[in-house]
Image (spheres, helix red, strand yellow):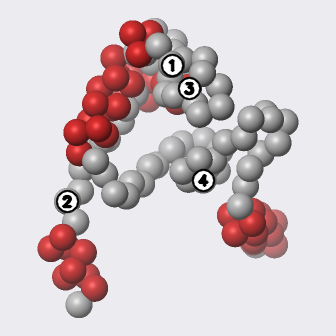
Amino acid sequence: MQTTLIVDNVHPHILPSMNPNGFSLRRCGNANKVDLNRDFSDRFFQMNDDLTERRPETKATMNWIKKIRFTASASLHGGALVANYPWDGTQDKRVAFLPNKILRAYHVYRLSKSVG
């Protein structure tokens, strides 16, 4: 019943890679050495609010997001363990905002890796 509901009503859109050049070169930066993860707006630090300065990959992704109006998303990201959620930043860069449930899950995960 639940599976049918999901299959009949979910419209998946897949972006295999926002940074295919960086992926093939095994680095964060694109072909111009720009870290696309840092090329989006930040609600606390307006370091890159000038849309004309954004990379073409970032602009295309932003336009796609505005056009589709997703209600949910998932992201696969290589490297460190990452958990992103809406409004996950803080003004004080020395302090990491991490909800208790995520923090607890991370500690359980780390403990399971150290025991096993």
Residue 39 x/y as whole percent: 50, 23
Mark 1, residues whose alpha carbon is within 10 Å: few (<14), some, or many (≥20)?
Answer: some
- The earlier-in-sequence mark between 3 and 1 is 3
Please tell me whether residue 29 is drawn above or below residue 101 in the rendered image: above
Which residue lies most toward the bottom here?
1
Q: In this image, 91 relative to 2: left or right?
A: right
Q: Tell me the SS state at disc 4.
A: loop
Give the class, few, some or many, for how many residues have Cα within 10 Å of label 3's Cα (few <14, many ≥20).
some
> In this rendering, does residue 106 appear at all?
no
Amino acid beneath label 3: Arg
Above or below, comparing residue 96 to residue 4 in the picture: above
Q: Of tags 1 and 2, which is closer to the observer?
A: 1
Residue 73, given in percent of the width and then of the height, sits at 39, 54
Please tell me which residue is depicted at 82% across the width and 42% down the height of the picture.
Answer: 95
User: In the rendered view, does 37 fall on the left or right side of 59?
Assistant: right
Label 2 amino acid?
A: His
Q: Nearer the viewer, residue 77 or 5?
A: 5
Residue 46: x %, y % from top left? 60, 21
* Residue wearing tag 4: 83
Quarter of the rendering occupied by the N terminus: bottom left
Q: Mark number for residue 38? A: 3
Relative to residue 24, is residue 41 drawn left or right?
right
Residue labelled with disc 2: 11
List the single residue furthest toward the right: 94
First in sequence: mark 2 or mark 3?
2
